[in-house]
Image: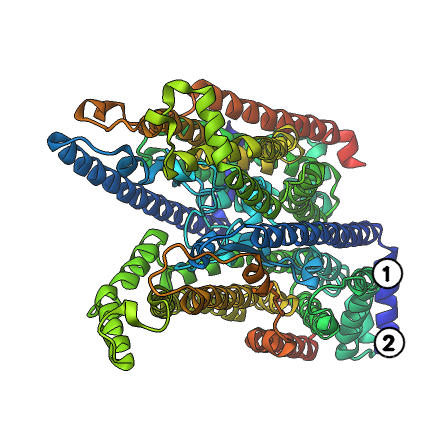
């Protein structure tokens, strides 16, 4: 413990350390502020959507208090299916700047491919990504750690002081491990503090728990990079060589492996063409439209209970029958699309430990609530909601039943159900375990390299 | 003497196993990126072509209907990739690929390819451009940081200087040797990329080589400036370690921090409007008129009065044409003024942001290079805007033809009028002519200027470091 304190003292005696820490704190604060701003914007948007929905409900209720309503006056107006703001937006902007968090669901557009965008964002900004806390933690935090800890003993080896130290019988493993921890501690502590702070700024009831888990992820990721520094020092014969190796390894893990994984994912499971999906949907629609009369008659044959008096279908009922047919025709195409995207994500999940940067990024966006799985849950629930809208209004249309006050509580409403905590926690904890295992593997490798014999060779 | 030193540097570099491994890695990445990008671009091209064909069939075979209803049925048009997207895909994954053209509305280009990808793409997409912007400078640094500082540390610099070798020969020779090593590494990659390009036959293929030439020049300047800076820093620092620290910091700030920082800072001072507000305001202006004085209904009332007066009639049914079609034409004209205003403002803002980010290239050359690269490759927002604009022009022409058909071919007051295949076939197929090189140049010139500034400054820095070359630096 004494030598740990001594190492810390030495570290803080160096002016460069203070410079490094000040810059790191600045990046953390900027990342937090940026993430919080994105979160505030998402909250504003969500509130506007909710206000709008509330106002519409009030109007409908007022009218229904007085008289009954034709269902087409209600069902034709889109209902906003809203993905509530992320639980801890300050942690990671993630995919929230790209994927829409609102979808308009109306009875007439159930089969239109959703083409929403999250915001009116400059495409170059989407391409560059945000300077949020996740960026600082995944990309910059390892750089700061390596800058503080890349020279654990390589410089001593170069200057010859290492041999002197070894001659005194000091255990290099213990001493280097202590040195790595001591040099990493200030940076690690700041990163963990910033993460916990982001967690505490979240509005969701489980934000604190998410923040604590994120801090665990950050800690594991930091330990991995310290272990990498130790491995490098087992090989490097000069401080410059150690710095060079550190830089290269960082590039490989943080830049090269993720882009390669993206290539693998997109080559293995290329997303089917949206252009073709759109054109096919229109072809199906126009085909169904031509058979409109035939479709509605066969529908009434199958559902005599829904047939209007005299079996005379109006234009609206015919449109519904056409839409149902388009839905049936497009089902396999949509499924193929969905499967390809799911398969892509599964490959990412399986291979995320190829680089701890990927695993950390996935875990942080998951905990922020801006990752893939939460948005997928949203899309699935929107699809189910479309089914509910159809199931509720379609019979009323066909039978031409007016809506009354008694129907009010039964109107389909969209309420997003968050994934159960146990499900996302399991994914995050698997991520943490994987990163820790990689850190441990590096640590063991470093230990074998940092024996007195090999070091004095 | 300069050439002797350059030759020695060149041989040393290629003898260094680490450089060979690094060079091989970069070369493989460049080639793989180029091949994959070509495959992706070709697949996307084929998909869009077949979708466009299907859409045309949908349009032509839509059956008989009122020509204005056909305007509501609308048509989708698809965006084609630039042939140079093989090299730099730019913002293409983050702008839409299809736009729905219909009566009364100007829609945004929808379906962003990045929406159908995993978050891995946000780490950066493997492309030849990315490898050259980020990885090659790193390789240059790793090769150069010790070029002079290392010799100073080991004492050989003092020996060489004492032999009477001029400092400028040492510094320039080192820089030249280094550049030659990197050029030898990039030559095969460039040849393969050129071969891929030569096979690219798409719109704008004739100007591909002018654009490619400028791309080569811009990247050449970028790599050279990195080499010059690296050698200059190495010549001015006490030891290799300090030199490496300074250079790696510069690299990280330039390649990793600057792109995000610049776009966030610029966005903070030049924000884009919120989507919901943009749409509400546009709808409101379509209804109330741009100045808010004359609502659409008032404007159309005045238009009706004027039309009746001009023709000396008292009722619209007496006009010699279908009045409904006539009004549709006017209301499209009124709406298009509003669309031009709002979309123009939005697109101007995005381009303003892009230019501001490119100007931040004064602090980080990669920003200027990236902007010039996307402009020359035809994959920046300015090129996308040209597509969106062309699609909108097509929409207006297409809706105008339909409304004119209604106006002149439907009998006054006839609500049952229908047109058919003959009219649908008469409507032109959407053809997008990519903008000429002059357009790319006007977008890229500021960035090229910034890059040139960096280039000149780095050469001056190199020369300056030669004049101050000492065996020992305090």
The correct choice, above or below, for B361 with respect to B31 in the image is below
Estimate the x, y position of residue A342 in percent, counting from the top left. 59, 31
Residue located at (78% from left, 30% from top): A453
The answer to whether residue B233 of the structure is visible from this angle is: yes
Estimate the x, y position of residue B355 in percent, counting from the top left. 49, 70
Q: Which residue is mark 1?
A: B12
Question: SS for tag 1?
Answer: helix
Q: Are marks 1 and 2 in contact (CB under 8 Å)?
A: no
Q: Is residue A12 left or right of residue B342?
A: right
Rendered-image quadrant of the N terminus of chain B? bottom right
Q: Which residue is mark 2?
A: B3
Estimate the x, y position of residue A193 in percent, counting from the top left. 40, 36
The correct choice, above or below, for A360 with respect to B166 in the image is above
Task: Say whether mark 2 and mark 1 are on the same chain.
Answer: yes
Q: Which chain is disc 1 placed on? A: B
The correct choice, above or below, for A445 with respect to A52 in the image is above
Q: Is residue A399 left or right of residue A25?
A: left
Location of residue A42 by image quarter: top left
The answer to whether residue A143 of the structure is visible from this angle is: no
Measure the alpha-carbon separation of dots 1 and 2: 14 Å
In the foreground, B278 or B471:
B278
Q: Which chain is disc 2 placed on? A: B
Rendered-image quadrant of the C terminus of chain B? bottom right
Can you name the residue that lies furthest to the left here? A66
**Disc 1 or 2, which lies upstream in sequence?**
2
Location of residue A96 by image quarter: top left
The correct choice, above or below, for B160 with respect to B144 in the image is below
Q: Is residue A329 left or right of residue A105?
A: right
Mark 1 packing: few (<14 Cα in 10 Å), some, or many (20+)? Answer: some
Residue located at (42% from left, 35% from top): A318
Question: SS for tag 2?
Answer: helix
């Amino acid at each position: 413990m004494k030598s740990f304190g001594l190492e810390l003292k030495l570290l803080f005696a160096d002016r460069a350390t203070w410079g490094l820490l000040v810059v790191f704190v600045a990046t953390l604060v900027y990342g937090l502020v940026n993430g919080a701003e994105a979160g505030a914007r998402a909250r504003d948007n969500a509130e506007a959507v909710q206000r709008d929905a509330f106002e519409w409900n009030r109007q409908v209720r007022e009218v229904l208090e007085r008289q009954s309503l034709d269902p087409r006056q209600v069902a034709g107006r889109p209902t906003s299916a809203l993905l509530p703001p992320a639980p801890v937006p300050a942690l990671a902007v993630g995919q929230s700047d790209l994927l829409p968090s609102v979808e308009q669901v109306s009875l007439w557009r159930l089969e239109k491919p959703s083409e929403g965008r999250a915001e009116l964002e400059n495409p170059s900004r989407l391409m560059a990504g945000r300077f949020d806390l996740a960026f600082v933690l995944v990309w910059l935090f390892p750089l700061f750690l390596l800058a503080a800890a890349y020279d654990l003993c390589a410089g001593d080896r170069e200057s010859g002081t290492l041999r002197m130290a070894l001659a005194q019988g000091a255990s290099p493993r213990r001493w280097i491990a202590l040195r790595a921890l001591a040099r990493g501690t200030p940076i690690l502590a700041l990163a963990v503090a910033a993460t916990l702070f982001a967690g505490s700024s979240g509005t969701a009831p489980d934000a604190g728990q998410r923040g604590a888990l994120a801090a665990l992820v950050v800690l594991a990721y930091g330990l991995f990079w310290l272990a990498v520094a130790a491995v490098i020092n087992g090989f490097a014969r000069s401080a410059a060589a150690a710095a060079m190796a550190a830089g290269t390894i960082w590039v490989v893990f943080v830049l090269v492996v993720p882009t390669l994984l993206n290539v693998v994912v997109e080559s293995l499971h290329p997303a089917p063409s949206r252009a073709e999906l759109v054109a096919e949907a229109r072809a199906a629609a126009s085909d169904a439209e031509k058979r409109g009369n035939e479709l509605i008659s066969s529908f009434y044959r199958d559902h005599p209970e829904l047939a209007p008096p005299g079996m005379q279908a109006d234009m609206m009922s015919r449109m519904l029958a056409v839409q149902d047919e388009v839905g049936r025709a497009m089902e396999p195409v949509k499924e193929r699309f969905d499967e390809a995207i799911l398969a892509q994500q599964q490959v990412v999940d399986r291979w995320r430990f190829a680089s701890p940067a990927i695993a950390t990024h996935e875990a942080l966006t998951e905990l922020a609530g801006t990752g893939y799985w939460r948005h997928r849950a949203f899309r699935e629930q929107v699809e189910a909601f479309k089914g509910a809208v159809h199931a509720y209004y379609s019979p009323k249309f066909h039978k031409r039943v007016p809506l009354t006050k008694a129907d009010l509580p039964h109107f389909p409403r969209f309420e997003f159900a968050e994934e159960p905590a146990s499900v996302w926690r399991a994914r995050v904890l698997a991520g943490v375990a994987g990163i820790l295992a990689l850190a441990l593997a590096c640590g063991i490798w470093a230990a074998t390299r940092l024996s007195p014999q090999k070091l004095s060779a | 003497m300069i050439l002797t030193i350059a030759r020695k540097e060149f041989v040393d570099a290629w003898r260094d196993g680490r450089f060979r491994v690094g060079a091989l890695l970069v070369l493989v990445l460049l080639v793989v990126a180029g091949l994959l990008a070509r495959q992706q671009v070709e697949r996307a091209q084929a998909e869009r072509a077949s979708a466009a064909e299907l859409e045309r069939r949908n349009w032509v075979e839509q059956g008989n209907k009122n020509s204005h209803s056909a305007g509501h049925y609308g048509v989708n048009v698809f965006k084609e990739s630039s042939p140079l997207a093989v090299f730099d895909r730019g913002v293409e994954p983050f702008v839409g690929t299809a736009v729905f053209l219909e009566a009364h509305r100007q829609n945004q280009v929808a379906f962003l390819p990045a929406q159908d990808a995993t978050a891995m793409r946000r780490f950066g997409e493997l492309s030849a451009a990315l490898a050259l912007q980020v990885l090659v400078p790193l390789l240059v640094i790793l090769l150069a940081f010790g070029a002079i500082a290392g010799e100073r540390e080991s004492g050989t610099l003092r020996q060489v200087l004492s032999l009477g070798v001029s400092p400028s020969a040492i510094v320039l020779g080192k820089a030249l040797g280094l550049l030659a090593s990197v050029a030898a590494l990039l030559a095969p990659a460039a040849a393969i990329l050129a071969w891929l390009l030569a096979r690219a036959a798409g719109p704008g293929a004739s100007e591909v080589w002018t654009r490619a030439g400028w791309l080569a020049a811009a990247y050449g300047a970028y790599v050279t400036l990195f080499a010059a800076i690296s050698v200059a820093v190495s010549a001015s620092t006490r030891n290799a370690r300090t030199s490496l620290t300074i250079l790696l910091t510069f690299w990280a700030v330039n390649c990793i921090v600057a792109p995000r920082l610049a776009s966030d800072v610029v966005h903070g001072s030049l924000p884009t409007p919120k989507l919901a507000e943009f749409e509400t305001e546009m709808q409101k202006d379509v209804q109330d008129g741009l100045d808010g004085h004359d609502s659409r209904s008032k404007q159309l009332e005045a238009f009706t009065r004027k039309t009746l007066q001009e023709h000396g009639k008292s009722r619209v049914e007496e006009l010699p044409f279908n009045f409904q079609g006539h009004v549709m034409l006017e209301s499209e004209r009124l709406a298009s003024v509003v669309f031009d205003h709002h979309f123009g403002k939005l697109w101007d803002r995005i381009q303003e942001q892009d230019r501001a980010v490119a100007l931040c290239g004064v602090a980080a050359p990669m920003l200027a290079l990236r902007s010039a690269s996307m402009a020359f490759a035809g994959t920046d927002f300015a090129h996308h805007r040209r597509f969106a604009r062309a699609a909108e022009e097509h929409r207006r022409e297409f809706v105008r033809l339909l409304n004119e058909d209604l106006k002149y071919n439907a009998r006054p007051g006839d609500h049952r009028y229908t047109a058919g295949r003959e009219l649908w076939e008469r409507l032109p197929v959407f053809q997008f002519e990519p903008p000429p090189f002059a357009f790319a140049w006007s977008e890229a010139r500021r960035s090229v200027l910034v890059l040139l500034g960096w280039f000149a400054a780095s050469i001056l820095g190199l020369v300056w470091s030669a004049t101050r070359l000492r065996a020992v630096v305090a």
